[in-house]
Image (cartoon, rainbow, N blue to C red):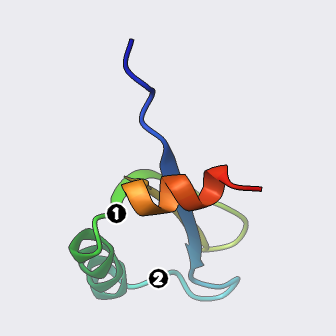
Amino acid sequence: MTEPIQCEYRVQTLGSTWHEPKDSEIATLLSGWGAEGWEMVSATHTTGNKLMLVARRPLSDIDRRRRSYP
């Protein structure tokens, strides 16, 4: 039986109560995340004009081993 894929997650909120994030700001952020191996899994409007983005990527073998030690 194979082990389930373990992931790490990243959450970032953009915008503010008065200003929503610009499309270019979102695109730049997501392009940077993609270059680092992150995949966006959720985008949610929160209070005001804020946008919460959630991304994930599989843990590398090194990180998985490091996290398994006490």
Residue at the extreme top of the image, as rendered: 1
What residue lies at 73% left-to-right and 66% top-to-bottom? 47
Disc 2 secondary structure class? loop
Q: Is residue 69 visible?
A: yes
Q: Can residue 44 be seen in this view?
A: no
Residue type for callout 2? Pro
What residue lies at 42% left-to-right and 36% top-to-bottom? 5
The quarter of the picture where the N terminus appears is: top left
Disc 2 crowd rating (10 Å Cα; few below 14, some 14-19, many 20+) is: some
List x then y, in percent, for residue 21: 46, 82
* Residue 59 occupies quadrant: bottom left
Is residue 2 or residue 14 the one in the foreground? 2
User: Image height check: is 1 above or below 10?
Assistant: above
Give the labeled residue for mark 1: 38
Task: Describe residue 22's horizontal placement relative to residue 12 as left or right.
Answer: left
Disc 1 secondary structure class? loop
Task: Describe residue 21's horizontal placement relative to residue 28 as left or right.
Answer: right
* Residue 18 occupies quadrant: bottom right
Of the two numbered discs 1 and 2 on the same chain, state the one appearing first in sequence: 2
Residue type for callout 1? Trp
Give the labeled residue for mark 2: 21
User: Mark 1 to mark 2: distance in Å?
Assistant: 20 Å
